[in-house]
Image: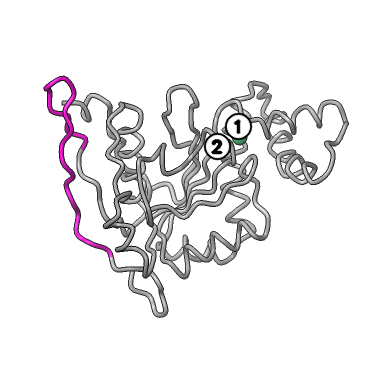
Amino acid sequence: MSRPGSPGTQPGPERTLPVPTTGGAPVDVGTVSAAPTNPGQALAELHAGNLRFVTGAPRHPNQDAGHRAAVADGQHPFAVIVGCSDSRLAAEIIFDRGLGDLFVVRTAGHTIGPEVLGSVEYAVTVLGTPLVVVLGHDSCGAVQAARTADATGTPPPGHLCAVVDAVVPSLRRAAAEGVDDIDRIVDIHIAYTVEAMLGRSAVLAAEVAAGRCGVVGMSYRLTAGEVRTVAAVPAGAVDTPVPSASAALA
Ligand SMILES: [Zn+2]
């Protein structure tokens, strides 16, 4: 991404990593792009990496000493991940990526305050990152805590109140839609977070309107390790084919 004053490194060529084998059978999990430059490419890279993780064929790209040295002078992450802080949701692991690939901001329940929005705006405008992902997951403890607090009328102690308060609008939306299942409420909260982020950040909204960035909401399943897209803005710009497990394992 070539923007005036950008501290990011220039994108490198697409690389094909060594093909691993399982039981003597070759496993083709595709290539790992050094630097996707548009929302669709970035989303495809995330899906490809997640598929490698799900199928037990991770490449662990960009985690070697050589790459560490190569990115020391500047970063060019291709995706911002605004994820839940849950310890089972480590972005570089579940998307099978490495150093310099992902700009990660995590809070309980992927709640978004000013510091989160400022971090997202920095990545999008200064680093030129083309994709923002809101990453939630099933059985989210923050959403469950908010639900309990709301149902009992008992606010949690300390700053946990801020997390609960940020989730309550999603609970209201779920109730209005007659949704009671916790994991469907999580999906609604992910979509709400995407909308809220764009509504509160004029900077991000302008980048999306200009076609330089896309915003998607993804839901992760703790047991299966899979992500699925539950919201996308704009829908067309990030609507890329999702690779299948059968295609990944030759
Ligand atoms: Zn969570």
Q: Quarter of the image for the C terminus: give it.
A: top left
In the displayed image of the protein, which residue is found farthest to the front? 65
User: Which quadrant holds residue 121?
Assistant: bottom right
Left or right of 226, for residue 118: right
Mark 2 and mark 1 residues within 8 Å of each other at the beta carbon:
yes
Compared to 194, does 74 lie above or below? below
Residue on which the image places disc 1: 186
On the picture, is 143 further left or further right than 38?
A: right
Residue kind at label 1, given as amino acid type = Val
The type of residue carrying mark 2 is Gly
| Residue range (magenta) | 11-29
Residue where numbered disc 2 is placed: 136
Gap in Å between the C-alphas at discs 2 and 1?
Answer: 7 Å
Q: Residues within 10 Å of mark 1 (few under 14, many from 20)?
A: many
Is 12 one of the magenta-colored residues? yes
Q: Quadrant of the N terminus?
A: bottom left
Q: Residue at x 21, y 35 (%)?
A: 29
Q: Is mark 2 within 8 Å of ligand 1?
A: yes
Res. 26 image quadrant: top left
Q: Secondary structure at mark 2?
A: strand
Q: Is the CB of mark 1 within 8 Å of ligand 1?
A: yes
Rendered residue at 60%/53% (across/down): 197
Q: Quadrant of residue 174?
A: top right
